[in-house]
Amino acid sequence: MELNKKSAKWYPGVWENYRAQLPAGAAVLYLTDWPSGPDFIKRQAGRLGMGFIYACALADFRASAGRSAFINCEGRALTLGAPAAPVAAGAGLTPASLAPTSNAQVLGGVA
């Protein structure tokens, strides 16, 4: 969660670290709490070719009870969802737990 906008110079190094350390197909989700935060994050990610970065406004996330879509620079959407089945403690999300729904994917289960 980012409550304040960072300098555009801050993101490239951090996101390069994410790209180097995350498994293939992983996504980084940003909740932002400043005006036009998601648009800024998506613009920066697009400029840097980082389609695995997704953003959502905190106000939208709260208003939707956590069901608002996170959108990336390519227009793809990810939505958090309740697990389809109980998840063992520490199991976390896996690529197998991602299920496509129209142009969106739901993390943790199906919509």
Image (cartoon, rainbow, N blue to C red):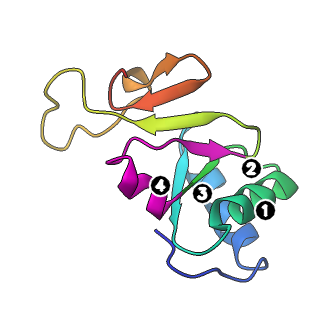
Which marked residue is nearer to the observer: mark 3 or mark 4?
A: 4
State the quadrant of the C terminus: top left
Which marked residue is nearer to the observer: mark 2 or mark 1?
A: 1
Q: Which residue is mark 2?
A: 50
Which marked residue is nearer to the observer: mark 2 or mark 4?
A: 4
Q: Are circles 2 and 3 on residues that touch, CB within 8 Å?
A: no
User: What residue appears at the point 33 percent right and 33 percent down from the top-left corner?
Assistant: 81
- Distance Cα–Cα, label 3 vs label 4: 25 Å
Determine which quarter of the picture holds residue 41: bottom right
Upstream in the sequence, badge 3 or badge 4? 3
Q: Are circles 2 and 1 on residues that touch, CB within 8 Å?
A: yes
Q: Which residue is mark 4?
A: 60
Q: Which residue is mark 3?
A: 18
- Distance Cα–Cα, label 2 vs label 4: 23 Å
Q: Amino acid at mark 1?
A: Gln
Task: Find residue 75 and report its horizontal and vertical position in percent.
Answer: 72, 37
